Image (tube, helix red, strand yellow):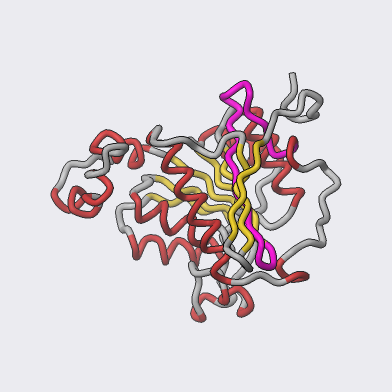
């Protein structure tokens, strides 16, 4: 896809005028392929902003169906989507927002070789999943293929986001931050979550993807951004590569 008509130039005009993007950066977005793992609270705003920003090819992966309890925060879906696969629902929403968007839908839990192949084809991976086993698997695949990973999480009124880029020798990975002993019971279904919180974190994930693709600004590599929604207090924690990490250490 190329910026070859007035409609596309008009659609993306407010981004093209930014010094860090311009025509060249917008073309990079149109040429990019981004894998979004999870189409729930985080994946919804992330996918929406990536689609409307002009990322040319989104690969959407989720093995779940839409439920009524999802609609409080998962803004890709609506009441007519209940019972439908989240991938199908998300595809309909995103293509209504941007008909030029190319979408590949995967209505399965990405694992093993399939996960590795999809990550290898992506320019950037968005981890918007809700369980540690998927996060660790995605992290390992990103390390193996040297694909940048934008990771987000939100629970109750707390959120966090970081970027792990194994192309950079000093970048930590997700396993440097969390070990394999994560609490799988810590989920929105068990603990609850405030709807706008996932919107904030998912939107930041989309922003970080755009920065990585266009080489604009400074991505959150080696930094963990933490939000306390109760006070709207932000903290930035420095992350260092764990020399003994079982996933990314040489």
Instruction: State the residue in front, 236 or 5.
Output: 236
Which quadrant holds residue 171?
Answer: top right
Q: Is residue 140 left or right of residue 3?
A: right
Q: Position of residue 158 (x, y in %)?
A: 66, 61
Say which residue appears at 23% left-offset and 54% top-offset: 11
Q: How many marks?
A: 0
Which residue sits at x=31%, y=37%? 20
Q: Is residue 145 left or right of residue 250?
A: left
Where residue 80 sits in the image (x, y, percent)?
49, 80
User: Picture coordinates of residue 211 (x, y %)?
Assistant: 43, 39
Q: Residue furthest top?
A: 250
Whether 247 is drawn above or below 30: the answer is above
In this orientation, which residue lies closer to the viewer: 240 or 151?
Answer: 240
| Residue 159: in magenta span | yes
Query: Residue at left 50%, top 52%?
Result: 204
Rendered-image quadrant of the N terminus: top left
Q: Which residues are magenta?
A: 155-175
């Amino acid at each position: 896809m190329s910026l070859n008509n007035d409609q596309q130039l008009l659609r993306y005009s407010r981004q093209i005028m930014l010094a860090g993007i311009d025509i060249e950066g917008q073309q990079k977005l149109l040429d990019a392929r981004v894998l979004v793992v999870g189409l729930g609270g985080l994946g919804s705003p992330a996918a929406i902003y990536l689609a409307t920003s002009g990322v040319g090819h989104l690969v959407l992966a989720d093995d779940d169906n839409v439920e009524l309890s999802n609609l409080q925060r998962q803004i890709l879906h609506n009441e007519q989507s209940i019972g439908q696969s989240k991938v199908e629902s998300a595809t309909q929403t995103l293509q209504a927002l941007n008909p030029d968007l190319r979408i590949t839908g995967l209505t399965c839990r990405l694992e093993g070789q399939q996960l590795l192949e999809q990550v290898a084809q992506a320019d950037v991976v968005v981890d918007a999943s809700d369980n540690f086993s998927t996060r660790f698997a995605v992290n390992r695949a990103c390390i193996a293929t040297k694909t940048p990973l934008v990771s987000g999480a939100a629970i109750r009124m707390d959120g966090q986001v970081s970027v792990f880029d194994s192309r950079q020798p000093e970048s930590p990975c997700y396993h440097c931050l969390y070990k394999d002993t994560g609490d799988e019971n810590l989920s929105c279904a068990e603990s609850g979550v405030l709807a706008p919180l996932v919107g904030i974190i998912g939107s930041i994930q989309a922003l970080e993807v755009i920065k990585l693709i266009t080489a604009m600004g400074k991505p959150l590599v080696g930094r963990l951004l933490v939000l306390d929604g109760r006070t709207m207090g932000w903290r930035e924690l420095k992350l260092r590569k764990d020399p003994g990490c079982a996933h990314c250490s040489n």
